[in-house]
Image (cartoon, helix red, strand yellow):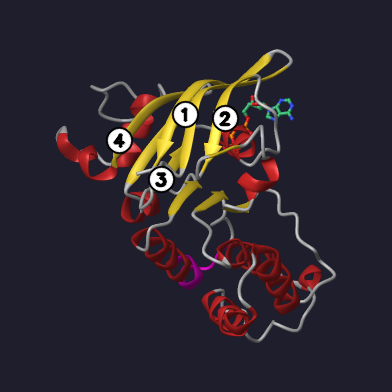
Amino acid sequence: MMNVVEIKGLSKSFRLTKAVDDVSLEIQAGDFVALIGPNGAGKSTLMNCIMGRLIPSAGQISVSGINVADDTVGARKKVGFVPQELDLHGYLTGEEYLRYLGSLRGVEAAKLDSEIERLLGLGDLLEARHRVIKEYSGGMARKIAIVGAMIGAPPLLVLDESFVGLDPESTWRIREALKVHCEQGGAVLLSSHILEMLEKVCSRVVMLRGGAVVLDSPMSDLDREGGKDLTRIYLELSGKLGPNALSIA
Ligand SMILES: Nc1ncnc2c1ncn2[C@@H]1O[C@H](COP(=O)(O)OP(=O)(O)OP(=O)(O)O)[C@@H](O)[C@H]1O
């Protein structure tokens, strides 16, 4: 089966900073991947390279078999993306925004109304559907961005810290919807620092440190060594906690 994402030898430097350092990664249909790592580890840079928003210094990326460098527009059509710093059309209402994205994605007119209804419900935004997005609260804006990324069920969702500021109910609803997206053959790449949540919902964890992959494991394999949770493993791999340390000094 074709990989949804194939990254080979990806590096990205900004002048003196090597933000991503020789990363190779494959994401398959059904994968719900948690992308973790300390601040500045390269998570956003990796995601922006997948989206063709940054040009890699080296390496190759393809999405659904489309080479991002050769056909950036074609590759982007396969991805629903929520950047860390939201970039919304604030003068549109929530409903207009979803309609606009749905038509860009080529969602059939007959299905568009019910899809918009479902996604507004998922984001608990039915009451706010006729308000312009620039008047939304921070959490509401993030939710319209997330459900907008999901319209038309693209093969890949790339979500950069998208749970920041979401209330508990919205967090729960959206994470369940992302699980369903993967069960139905989609893939999700989600960067976050909320390790307890990632542990519950993701099927796989990839950790970056200094731009390089230091962990790539099915989530279910993590507790093999003596019941360590993701936080413990993260602290060890980030160099903050030695394997034998009993507490954080
Ligand atoms: N446009 C840029 N110009 C220069 N340096 C950059 C740029 N974008 C990112 N960097 C640097 O690249 C490195 C990786 O940054 P990146 O934003 O990818 O990290 P991150 O893992 O997403 O961090 P965080 O958890 O804080 O969001 C950092 O050292 C950062 O300062």
Q: Residue at x 70, y 12 (%)?
A: 16
Q: In this view, does 79 lie above or below 240?
A: below
Decide if residue 186 is on the left or right side of residue 90: left
- Report whether the residue tagged 2 is closer than 8 Å to ligand 1: yes
User: Which residue appears farthest toward the bottom when viewing the image?
Assistant: 127
Q: What element carries label 1?
A: strand
Q: What stretch is highlighted in magenta?
A: 166-171
Q: Is mark 3 on a helix, strand or loop?
A: strand
Q: Distance between the residues labelled 2 and 4?
A: 18 Å
Q: Quadrant of residue 243?
A: top left
- Report whether the residue tagged 1 is closer than 8 Å to ligand 1: yes
Q: x, y percentage for residue 240?
A: 41, 25
User: Which residue appears farthest toward the top when viewing the image?
Assistant: 16
Q: Quadrant of residue 101?
A: bottom right
Quadrant location, the C terminus: top left
Q: Residue at x 28, y 44 (%)?
A: 219
Q: Mark 3 points at which residue?
A: 33
Circle nearer the viewer, 3 or 1: 3
Residue nearer the viewer, 194 or 180 = 180
Q: Distance between the residues labelled 1 and 2?
A: 7 Å
Query: Do residues under tags 1 and 2 come within 8 Å of each other at their CB atoms?
Result: yes
Q: Is mark 4 on a helix, strand or loop?
A: strand
Q: Magenta region's main secondary structure?
A: helix
Circle nearer the viewer, 3 or 2: 3
Q: How far apart are marks 4 and 3 (CA)?
A: 10 Å
Q: Which residue is drawn at 43% across and 56% down?
A: 186
- The answer to whether residue 176 of the structure is visible from this angle is yes
